[in-house]
Image (cartoon, rainbow, N blue to C red):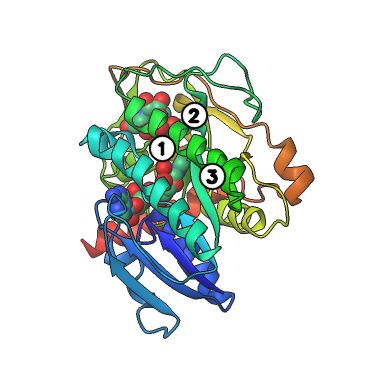
Amino acid sequence: MRILITGGAGFLGSHLCERLLREGNEIICLDNFFTGRKRNIAHLFGDSNFELVRHDVTNPFHFEVDQIYNLACPASPPHYQHNPIKTTKTSFLGAMHSLGLAKRVGARVFQASTSEVYGDPEVHPQPESYKGSVNPIGIRACYDEGKRVAETLFFDYYRQHQTEIRVVRIFNTYGPRMLPDDGRVVSNFIVQALSGKDLTIYGDGTQTRSFCYVDDLIDGFIRLMNHPAQTGPVNIGNPGEFTMLQLAELVLKKVGGPSKITFLPLPGDDPKQRKPDITLAQKDLGWAPTVELDKGLDATIEYFDTLLKEG
Ligand code: NAD
Ligand code: UDP
């Protein structure tokens, strides 16, 4: 198949490009390099089935493709809050242009949505039926509401035009090729520990997250995209739940060195807890995560260790 991946040079996109190429597909990787890096996909340049296009999804795009994965959007709070108006535009227009193209060429289209559509959840763990608790005017809204309206567009194209849609709600995912200065908690803690700096916990560290290793997530993406009927939304994530204090202690134990823990103010609207209910993914996609945090952290620490040594 010929497959378009928007945001293909980012953390998740680069793993998806790699996996789909390996399975014998032709890949068009589209990215504006806001948080993506050529380095993430440089090893694919020699493959004649791989094509890179520098483009911004806020402008329309046209390719003859069979499938579209729409991943373009900065994902870490510091990056998506850097230019929040642009973040909302990227989510909305990126979804609209992906759907417009899918309708025009008859492609199946996949949206990388997020557990952030649940906001600061009052239901725990979160099933897909939970409608969420999002502050529409807070500092996370550009991302949360951008992703929510993208889901709305997907389901309206499905109802109005019978466009073949697939929507995944991704819970915190980590692994090699996250940016070292990305600002997300796993990369922050590992880079801080490897550099002998103190680990920065925001708030008192009792907030929880559930961390999925990137290979597991990509497997879930492909199962959903190729499912004959399931449109989603489907939660994909690892239900193992950890406080940020537990995560910091685990990273410190693994990396060793002089680092300690320091506490900084909690950013606005930071969700207190998050854990996916993955019953639907297990039942319909036969998917469940296979990589425990302990093992996934080892691979991620090794990646950042090499990266920092290379300078
Ligand atoms: P990332 O920042 O590494 O990747 C995003 C990619 O999109 C980058 O390559 C960036 O340059 C590109 N991009 C951003 N704006 C663009 C634009 N206007 N036009 C073209 N390209 C643009 O983040 P990621 O973790 O790989 O996330 C990928 C997708 O998955 C995002 O849509 C994100 O919202 C979603 N997601 C990720 C997680 C996670 O834990 N990693 C969780 C929930 C949702
Ligand atoms: N966090 C932290 N220290 C950091 C970075 C993040 O304690 O250096 C916290 C953050 O406040 C949040 C959790 O870790 O409660 C996860 O943050 P991340 O940005 O990775 O993802 P999100 O909040 O979008 O789930």
In the image, residue 179 above or below residue 205:
below
Left or right, 178 with reference to 297: left
Between residues 305 and 231, which one lies in front from this camera angle?
Answer: 231
Q: Decide which of tag 1 and tag 3 comes sooner along the chain.
A: 3
> Amino acid under label 3?
Tyr
Q: Which residue is mark 1?
A: 252
- Residue 184 lies in what quarter of the image? top left
Secondary structure of the residue carrying tag 2 is: helix
- Mark 2–mark 3 Cα distance, whole angstroms, equals 19 Å
User: For mark 3, does the 10 Å Cα neighbourhood hold few (<14), some (14 to 19), or many (20 or more) residues?
Assistant: some
Whether residue 217 is visible here, answered yes or no, is yes
Q: Which residue is mark 3?
A: 157
In the image, residue 124 above or below residue 65:
above
Q: Decide which of tag 2 and tag 3 comes sooner along the chain.
A: 2
| In front: label 2 or label 1 | 2
The quadrant in which the C terminus is found is: bottom left
| In front: label 1 or label 3 | 3
Left or right, 59 with reference to 14: left
